[in-house]
Image (tube, rainbow, N blue to C red):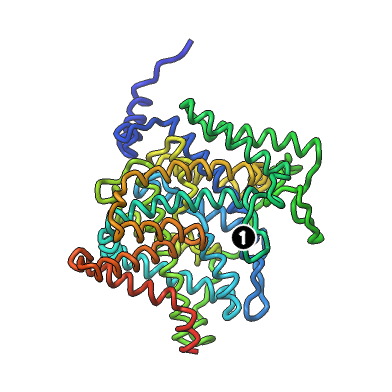
Amino acid sequence: MTTAPTDTETKHAGRLDRFFEITARGSTVGAEIRGGLVTFVAMAYIVILNPIILSSGTDVEGGTLAFAQVAAVTALTAGVMTMLFGLVTRLPFAFAAGLGINSFLAVSVVGQVTWPEAMGLVLLNGLLIVLLAATGLRQLVFDAVPLQLKTAITVGIGLFIAFIGLVDSGFVTSTGASSPPVGLGIAGSVATVPTLLFVITLLITAVLLARQVRGAILIGLASGTVLSILVEAIWNLGPRIGGDGAVNQQGWGLTVPELPGSLVSVPDLGLIGQVSFGSFERIGVLAATMLVFTLLFTNFFDAMGTFTGLSREAGLADTRGDFPRLRSALIVEGVGAVAGGATSSSSNTVFIESGAGIGEGARTGLANLVTGGLFLLAMFFTPLTTIVPTEVASASLVTVGALMMAQIRHIDMGDFAVLLPVFLTVTVMPLTYSIANGIGAGFISWVVVHALSGRIRRISPLLWVVAAGFVIYFARGPIEALLG
């Protein structure tokens, strides 16, 4: 026998519904919880991958970051920023350490400065983004982008997400040759069990989606994970890269799907506040400014592209590609960079993997509370985040990528002045592994082709400025060399 909800429970439920606009957006509390859970599962790898990337970098003084400390602050910052964004904007876009910026920091920045100084540059980058957003300039740039390019950004991100999933699963691998640079699996075959489980998970999810089963992506992830745990228990495949550096081609990628011996670990948050602004003295004002400029452009346009893609996928974008509480979203995204610098977890930004939760039905910030809460729990239950193998999680990325690419049907590409910028935006993103690069190629080509084909009046003045900025962004290496 079920008990009817009390008046108080109904009242609270009504407030929750009105605050997050759950019913107004055609969602339900159950869909938001499922979506938040799926987004976390799709993003949980960042708690492992971000420490791998950041702890691999050695700064100018020989300093390194401890893996466990980076893992703890990665989960903490992702949880806090995801929940903050959900509460402020009521949108289902989760936050975590941006992969492009953390790689740039580990490879390019800390060879010139110390880790605290690198995080100081990240913090400055975030403050500039907050300033641009608070003054409305960032939204003006957002509004200046033609709708065709906004849609192309969505399609490009879909292809990018799918490509990430295909690479992370081992379905697409580097050949090590100049041509072709990538190929299928190992020597042209799906030759490993983890990659086969990716294929199985992808097909399970696809069939469930085709049959319009609710919770299809989550069911697919859970099914793939259970199969993976059973396979590992029977065949003991182990990791792809052993502790001694030996390569086991039949092994798993970032995580081995096995039940952990210990469920709880105490987080070490010692990296919080380890920030310095001494880089301007160490390498000079011009060189440090160029580093901030690079961080700013990457952060600014990666986030803009991701916002565009996710809002369209969630059905929250209007005819111009704008979405609810846009300025607030842009401000909070800048706060993510500030928080990432302050905690040494690298700039935190909106994650394209949020599309997995959106594909599961998430439409409001309530999903973010679920995702953020799970990230905060992950600080204490880090071993559990390693249960879902990368290969299985990758299947959801490919699925979401396919869903996002369907937006291309909204673009009329009969005009080559539109076709070329759209094509470059869509293809450059996955081929260069950068959302910002794809946006830059699209912006520059749009301005040049339209200006020289007699349509200069159709180009927003701000688009000229942004395109010029991207020219500098693409030429930053030679510019830095000249300044040096």
Q: Residue at x 41, y 40 (%)?
A: 366
* SS type, badge 1: loop
Q: Residue at x 48, y 45 (%)?
A: 401
- State the residue in front, 207 or 246: 207
Q: Say left or right for 176 vs 362.
A: right
User: Outermost residue, top direction?
Assistant: 1
Image coords of residue 359 (percent x, y): 45, 38
The answer to whether residue 20 is above or below residue 99 is: above
Q: Is residue 381 visible?
A: no
Q: Is residue 133 visible?
A: yes
Q: Residue at x 26, y 58 (%)?
A: 143
Image coords of residue 292 (percent x, y): 44, 75
Q: Quadrant of residue 471?
A: bottom left
Image coords of residue 482 (percent x, y): 47, 89
Image coords of residue 409 (percent x, y): 34, 44
Q: Say left or right for 102 vs 290.
A: right
Q: Say left or right for 410 vs 248.
A: left
Q: Which residue is mark 1?
A: 180
- State the residue in front, 272 or 83: 83
Q: Quadrant of residue 333?
A: bottom left
Within 10 Å of the Cα at label 1, are there few (<14), some (14-19), or many (20+) other Cα atoms? few
Q: Amino acid at mark 1?
A: Pro
The answer to whether residue 373 is above or below residue 270 is: above
Give the number of marks.
1
